Image (tube, rainbow, N blue to C red):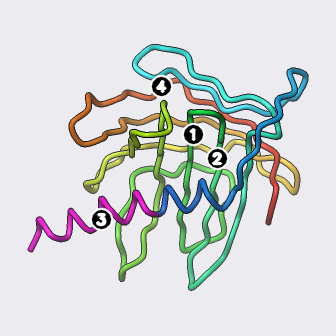
Amino acid sequence: MTTIKIYFRNHSLMLLWLLALLSSGCKKNKDSDDPYFISFLANGEKVEFKGESNLSAEFQFTTNIYTANITAITDPADMSLQLYSSREIKPGTYSGYSYNSGMLTGAVIGYSPDGIIIYLSETELSDDPTIIITELDDDIIKGSFEGTIKSAGQMDIEITQGEFQVKITDQ
């Protein structure tokens, strides 16, 4: 029974990650003077998504849960920082995640370096990952993140020194 629950959780998280990326739409234009970005080290290697046209931050409230999806879509890589809370998303620290009454609460990091293999943060209950919102207003969300992401049959990726500054596209 535990194996079925873990299998369901893993696939549910992957589905949530894909839906978050698809809901933010495909955007391609880059603007080098644009102040918006998501950047991090993936196993020590710099990864950066830049430009308002490639990034989005969307907030929703549905069925007693508040969500924030901060996404980057480029060709071929994609990135998603997701927050789930029973309270309104505000500046603060969001770490790990859990299921309470069938609802996911906490933080999830998703990353696809090639548009094919999808890595997600830890699928067991833990304090990993951590997403910290340092600034949030009607126009911008800013903060930091870190955690270990995994994909079946692949080496883990350690995300460190993650930072983001993204324009809010929907609230």
Q: Which residue is mark 2?
A: 71
Q: Which residue is mark 1?
A: 78
Is there CB contact under 8 Å for labels 2 and 3? no
Secondary structure found at label 1: strand
Q: Which residue is mark 3?
A: 9
Packing grade of label 2 (10 A; few <14, some 14-19, many >=20) is: many
Q: CA distance from mark 1 to mark 3?
A: 21 Å
Quadrant in the picture for the N terminus: bottom left
Secondary structure found at label 4: strand
Q: Quadrant of residue 76?
A: top right
Q: Tell me which numbered mark, 4 or 3, is placed earlier along the sequence.
A: 3
In depth, the one of 105 and 18 nearer the eye is 18
Could you tell me the amino acid type at mark 1? Asp
Secondary structure found at label 2: strand
Q: Tell me which numbered mark, 2 or 3, is placed earlier along the sequence.
A: 3
Is there CB contact under 8 Å for labels 1 and 2? yes
Q: Position of residue 48 (x, y in %)?
A: 64, 24
Q: Residue at x 42, y 43 (%)?
A: 129
Is there CB contact under 8 Å for labels 4 and 3? no
Q: CA distance from mark 4 to mark 3?
A: 25 Å
Q: Residue at x 87, y 27 (%)?
A: 31
Q: CA distance from mark 4 to mark 1?
A: 17 Å
Q: CA distance from mark 2 to mark 4?
A: 17 Å
Packing grade of label 1 (10 A; few <14, some 14-19, many >=20) is: many
In the image, which residues are magenta?
A: 1-15
